[in-house]
Amino acid sequence: MSLVHVRERSPPEGRPLVGVRLCLLVAGCVGLLVIGGFVVSGGLGLAVGTGSATDVAAQPNASASDEIETDDAEPTSVEPGADATEDDETPRHVDPDAYGEAGDAEGLADWYERQLADRFGEGSARMSEGDYERARELVDDEVAELVAEYVDLAEVTDRDDRVEEYATIQEGQLELAEAVEAYEERYEMYERAEAAGDHQRARQLARILEELAADVEETSAELLERYDETGAESEAAEFAESGETIVAVTEDIQRRQAEIRGEQFTPTQLSVSVWDESISYVEPLEATGLLVTEAGEPVANEEIQLAVGNQTVSATTDADGRFIVEYRPVDVPVDAEELDVAYEPAPLAGYSGSNATVPVSIEQVEASIDEPEVVPESAGFGDELRVESSIVVDGEPVEGVSLRVAIGGGAASAGAGGAAIDGATGEGGTAETVEADGGAIATNVTVPAAVEDGDRPVTVSMARDDRAVTASESRTTVTVTETETALSLSVEDGDDRVGVSGRLTADEAGVGNRTVDVAIDGVTAGAVETDADGAFNGTVVVPPGIDGGNVTVEASFDGGGTNLAGSSETATSFVPGAETGSMLASPVVWVVVGGVAVVIGAWWYRRRRRGHEVDGYEWVRPDVDRSAVAEAGGGVEPATLLSAAAGALADDRPATAIERAYAAARLALETRHEAPAGLTPWEFYAYCRERPDADDDEALRTVTDAYERASFDPAPVDDRTAKRVLTRTRRLCRDSRIGLEN
């Protein structure tokens, strides 16, 4: 059912002055109290409207249930498709009204995608010019801001997958900028060495440049593939232009590197033949090879390094460039059908690398892992355990293998195809992967809070189970002791909410990523999360039924599922409303307060009967003649009001933008929650907050508070507040699924 209607009116000459008059009247009454000597020691807290907007914001460490305020920028007036100037270093915005009365979310999403493509394009252009700092700033900072604004539109327009695509492109372009910068820095060093006649240094740098040029080529290819996929979906021409710039940068680097390669290195050719394709760790690959230059000259009597699979083996060439090599497969996939063999020249060698492949069939071999030795035998949160073990096949240590050490939570798990999952061993566990040296490991592992106290397993296992060498896990136990915790707590008084901050520690060390519950006078009020240092900072809403005055705020940590003992701390806060003091006993006070109440009541009645004017629209209460609304074209959708609000903000009318945004939120939520007619803004807020399906408490409070201030406070409203209100209103309307579906 629709309980609020709006009808278009001609814009009034200025803002209504009723709010100003009301504030002057209240100020005059307060003045009478002061003159009469009735302001007693301790003062009288007069609450006009509600708490400030900053009271609503949860701090960075607040729990997920708390609203975290961000400076969400709304589009300002720039026509769709308009080109930005080269010096435009902030996200360009667009007037949503340009996309039609219904808000045209699809059109606005297209605009954001063009801006993202533009930032990527400008970033690649700056990279090609050598301005790497600006290139990173465009792609790292400005793209992140645009993506944050684009997220909600992506959800409304079924483009959620593109958010991840843009994040992937952002990461890839940052990597490319770093790779290009690293190459250019070494290239300048190479040119200086050549100019100085330091040929040995030049050859060393040429070898490094070979690797850096390969990094640029690989990163560029991956990024261009992402460009092609995302550009085709978004139809943004800027992606094609950016891709052309990246291709040009990559080709230029490869051209220069080819020149360096020709000057510094003699090309080689590698050939390898195996005696038997069936191999295993106990029956290694044996092969003969030949290493010559492209001209057929042997690389004679050289000790060479060959990369086979993911291991490096040594060999020595004879006078004809021939060699024999042996290789035991360890950490290569057991289903591999061929192995890559690569000649890796020494840094000062005058040869370039070359490659060959050999066919193989690998048989998996079962190794054994010795029972781990753990010192000490008992430990608590934050303590280090020394874990030592080894892996052998037929009593011989296995080289080149990765082992996983885990505490609590059982055996290390593996993903699809045997892919290892770092840091996860099951609920309550922790793990790390260690490279075995000579078949042995010795590592220190810190006991985390997530391992429950008691006798817990310490396991050593293979990092992957799909390799040429596998093994069953080996385990022992360690006693994890419980550690006492301490909570500190500070509170900050508010209106109907309380700010809480403090720190959770164990043995004076901060305990991160833990939940701290907050109660007021024994009633649960919310929860906050600790950061990496154990600190927390947030706000909680005073539960219904709590009387005003001094209240007890308790922060508590229960320690469940950890090796930490629970702890709690209390503090006293003041909630306005209960303490009246001697002043309320004065007849004069009651006369003045009564007078103010009469004036406010008369104004409210007049406002309710006439409806509330918002520039260009009139908000008509349900008890107003509906036929008049219908004749004027009633039933406006929230999206229309949101577009009007954005237009008002673009016209530098933030107060009007807030009023129109509130009308949109009110219309959406009245329908969602089936609110009764005739509620004041704060009565409506209280009604919505108590609904079983209410999940918009903080956002609605922000919008309502700003609306009251914009309507009745003579102080001007700033653009930042209006932008924040529009962001919250979009969320409220989206969640209500009213007027935003195309």
Image (tube, rainbow, N blue to C red):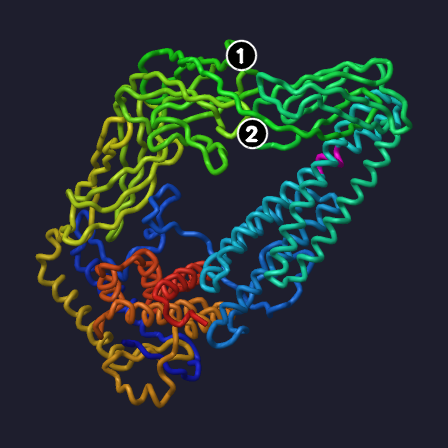
Q: Residue at x 35, y 68 (%)?
A: 665
The residue segment tinted magenta is 181-185
Q: Residue at x 35, y 16 (%)?
A: 476
Q: Is residue 512 left or right of residue 583?
A: right
Magenta: predominant secondary structure element? helix
Q: Residue at x 44, y 22 (%)?
A: 461
Which kind of residue does numbered mark 2 sit on? Val
Residue wearing tag 1: 397
Q: Toward which corner of the image does residue 726 lie, by quadrant?
A: bottom left
Which kind of residue does numbered mark 1 sit on? Pro
Q: Is residue 378 left or right of residue 343?
A: left
Cα separation between marks 2 and 1: 20 Å
Q: Is residue 226 left or right of residue 384?
A: right
Residue wearing tag 2: 334
Between 154 and 350, the residue placed more toward the observer is 350
Between 340 and 113, the residue placed more toward the observer is 340
Tell me if residue 719 comes above or below residue 602 in the rendering: above
Q: Toward which corner of the image does residue 360 lie, by quadrant?
A: top right
Q: Residue at x 69, y 40 (%)?
A: 218
